[in-house]
Amino acid sequence: MATPTALPPLPFNPARVRSYVLRIPLFTRLVLLAILVFWLLELQTVWSVVQWGALTPDEIGLGTMYRLNTYPFIHSGFFHAFLNVLALTPLLERFEAEHGTLTAVALFIGPLSTFPAGLYLLFEKVLLHRNTAVVGASVWVFLLLGSEAIRTFKSNPYFSLGSLKIPTWTSPLIASVLVSILMSNTSFLGHLCAIAVGYLLGLGYLKLFVPPEKILRWIEGKLNLLGRLPHYVSVDQKTYGRYGVLPTTNNSSGERPTPMSNYLGANQRLGP
């Protein structure tokens, strides 16, 4: 009787993956769920979710301002959504763990969606006179990479590439260039707008848009959010300081997630 051949070990530890998934905080879970729901809705052929919610310059008006918030949740296919989720999840859950759930909601439903969208509309329609629609959560991927790059630059100003010393704050810009070269039809302009807002976040210029901690505590206590909502991160449970952008480690290699992009008809995807 032949001896059964032992299966090769898995490249990852399932127990650690399960533990990581179980501790993903509430807002990050809701964002991932929204991405999944919009992708499932796009499978039907009666109504195009991409056309409805994409950031399309010529379609922006008083009745369609919702597009400033819907475009990060919408993707143009399974792999677009899947790769965006892989890149976004660790960045977003760390941000929420650091700042709290209410702060994450206030920022990502507010300025961290609308400011990159506004910059994109300004350059795309007003200055370039084009009408390329964009979708995808990589707007948040590059934004968070930008903010983390600023934080890293303060403690580790350079990373080495052979004999070159490159400022760490340029790492998201390098990533966006590489993505544009390696992946066809990438929204390079959309990524640059996201990085610019990420730099502002990292430098602390967006603190103005964060509700005061006193108000957040009052809302949490009044609604008993910590007791009612599983995986909710209270303003008093944050892992890190209130306005530190993202936790970083001393990494001289400038390592970062790699987003990607593509077209769907006239709609240009943002990110992975």
Image (spheres, rainbow, N blue to C red):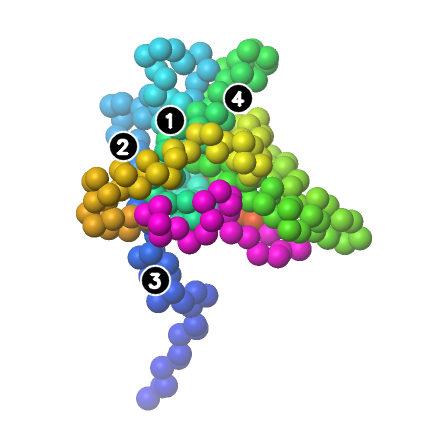
Element on which disc 2 rests: helix
Q: What stretch is highlighted in magenta?
A: 234-255
Q: Residue at x 21, y 50 (%)?
A: 227
The reply to whether the magenta stretch includes residue 235 is yes
In the picture, the disc for residue 69 is 1
**Badge 3 density bin: few <14, some 14–19, many ≥20, Cα 10 Å:** few
Q: Earlier in the sequence, mark 2 or mark 4?
A: 2
Q: Which amino acid does label 2 sit on?
A: Leu
Q: Main secondary structure of the magenta part?
A: loop
Q: Which amino acid does label 3 sit on?
A: Ser
Alpha-carbon span between mark 4 and mark 1: 14 Å
Q: Which of 56 and 167 is in front in this view?
A: 167
* Vertical order, 238 against 132 (above or below): below
Mark 3 and mark 1: span between their CA atoms? 31 Å
- The label shown at residue 19 is 3
Q: Residue 41 carries which label?
A: 2
Three-letter amino acid code of the residue under disc 4: Leu
Residue sitting nearer the eye, 91 or 98: 98
In the image, farthest residue toward the front: 214
Label 2 crowd bin: few (<14), some (14–19), many (20+), radius 10 Å: some
Left or right of residue 178, residue 101 in this image: left
- For marks 4 and 3, give the CA distance: 38 Å
| Rendered image: mark on residue 119 | 4
Quadrant location of residue 44? top left
Lower position in the chain sequence, tag 3 or tag 1: 3
271 or 219: nearer the eye?
219
- Image coordinates of residue 212 in percent, x first then y, are 39, 35
